[in-house]
Amino acid sequence: MGLGRRRFLAGALLGTAGAAWEGRPPVEGPGRHALPDEPHPPPRSTVAVVRPADFPGLAAAVGEAIRLAGGLAFVGPGESVLLKPALNSGRPYPATTDPELVHVLAELVRERGGRPFVADRTMFLRSTRAALERTGILDAARAAGMPCLALEDSAAVALRHPLASHWPGRAVEIYRPAAEADHVINLCTPRTHRLGGFTMALKNCVGLVAGSARPGMHLGSGFRERLAEISLVVRPSLVVLDGRLGFSDGGPDEGDLCRPGFIAAGPDPLAVDAVGLAHLRLAGTNATIGTGSIWRIPVMHRAAEIGVGVGSADRIHLVGLAPPSEERLRREMA
């Protein structure tokens, strides 16, 4: 992004910041996806990691990763399942989710009797409809016969959580289709991010935050903590991290391309992000996320503090990898 565009966006954000927290929807309860009021991380989290090169195609690799991670048994007949892509722009994978992955998950959800749909809100000042069309996600949704929602057309609900201390009134504005879905499946890619440090499962939830709340969310101190706190009110049932490609620097919509060559799946977004960060480190990422403990990275630290997921590598149960590969990942997750 050029300096002129950055200045324009900064001016636009500052110009609307005063109104960003005004006219907010009424505060409701914590929502159906909320975490406990007190930090209560799981004692252990399973993350499955497979190498797509070992499979005949993406569908087979993703299916195996999900199976190893526990499957889709959480999906009941007739339940609605939001497939949340990464859609910060109209740029192709890995800047955004591969539309083939969207189609694969739709078929898997349908096999369980669920009702999949795609929904997202792209980056501030950009058109979600245009991004859905340019990335091919809209075509993938049509091919799968499921709804595809541009969330700026939807109403929002402010969900309160006592641990969302970096949000005004401890309430996070979430688009109603996300708040009301029976399940959310987070479909993300491993990328660095100029503001957040990195973007994977935790950061991908920003697409469910109401557009009116976005300017204020980005301004002032606590931005990275706010990113982590979104998962207090809308924690996914499953994360699928498509790491065949990624960005080792730059991001989110363009950056230095790398080829980590993995698919990861699991119900714990913090644990999946730890695996993704380890892969980016092995690929040669920048100093912001490439040095020191990954558990001290602000988004990771806050997510662990509020119980979004496990807070250490020894509590992550890795499955699907040969011992030498697992050892390399664990060294990077220290």
Image (spheres, rainbow, N blue to C red):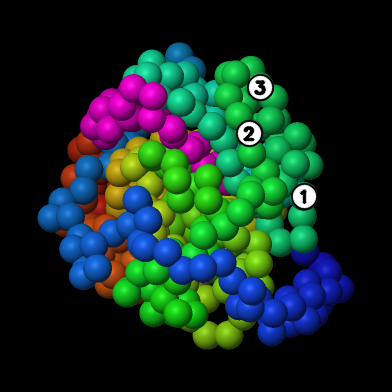
Marks 3 and 1, the one that precedes in the sequence: 1
Specify the label residue 127 is tagged with. 1
**Range drawn in magenta:** 61-86
Q: Mark 2 or mark 3, which is nearer the start of the sequence?
A: 3
Is there CB contact under 8 Å for labels 3 and 1? no
Q: Secondary structure at mark 1?
A: loop
Q: Label 1: how many residues lie within 10 Å, few (<14), some (14-19) or many (20+)? A: some
What percent of the width, then of the height, locates residue 237?
Answer: 34, 42
Along the line of sight, which residue is nearer the eye, 257 or 270? 270
Task: Pinpoint residue 170: horizontal percent, then vertical percent.
Answer: 41, 76
Q: Which residue is mark 3?
A: 142
Q: What type is the residue that disc 1 sits on?
A: Ser
Q: Nearer the viewer, residue 105 or 48?
A: 105
Is residue 314 at least partly visible in the picture?
yes
Residue 75: image tag: none
Q: Quadrant of residue 114?
A: top left
Judge left or right: residue 60 versus residue 205. left
Q: Up-down: is 18 above or below 177?
A: below
Image quadrant where one finds the C terminus: bottom left
Please report the residue visible at 58 percent of the width from the left and 85 percent of the height from the top. Answer: 220
Residue at position x 21%, y 48% from top? 45
For the residues labelled 3 and 1, the Cα–Cα distance comes to 19 Å
Residue drawn at x 63%, y 24% is: 140
Measured as percent of width and height from the top left, residue 86 is found at 58, 46
Residue for badge 2: 148
Q: Is residue 272 left or right of residue 96?
A: left
Instruction: Examine the structure image and report whether residue 83 is included in the region drawn in magenta.
Output: yes
131 or 294, which is in the foreground?
A: 131
In the picture as drawn, the residue positioned furthest to the left comes out as 43
Q: Label 2 sits on what residue type? A: Cys
* Marks 3 & 2, CB-CB < 8 Å contact: yes
The residue mark sitting in front, 2 or 1, is 2
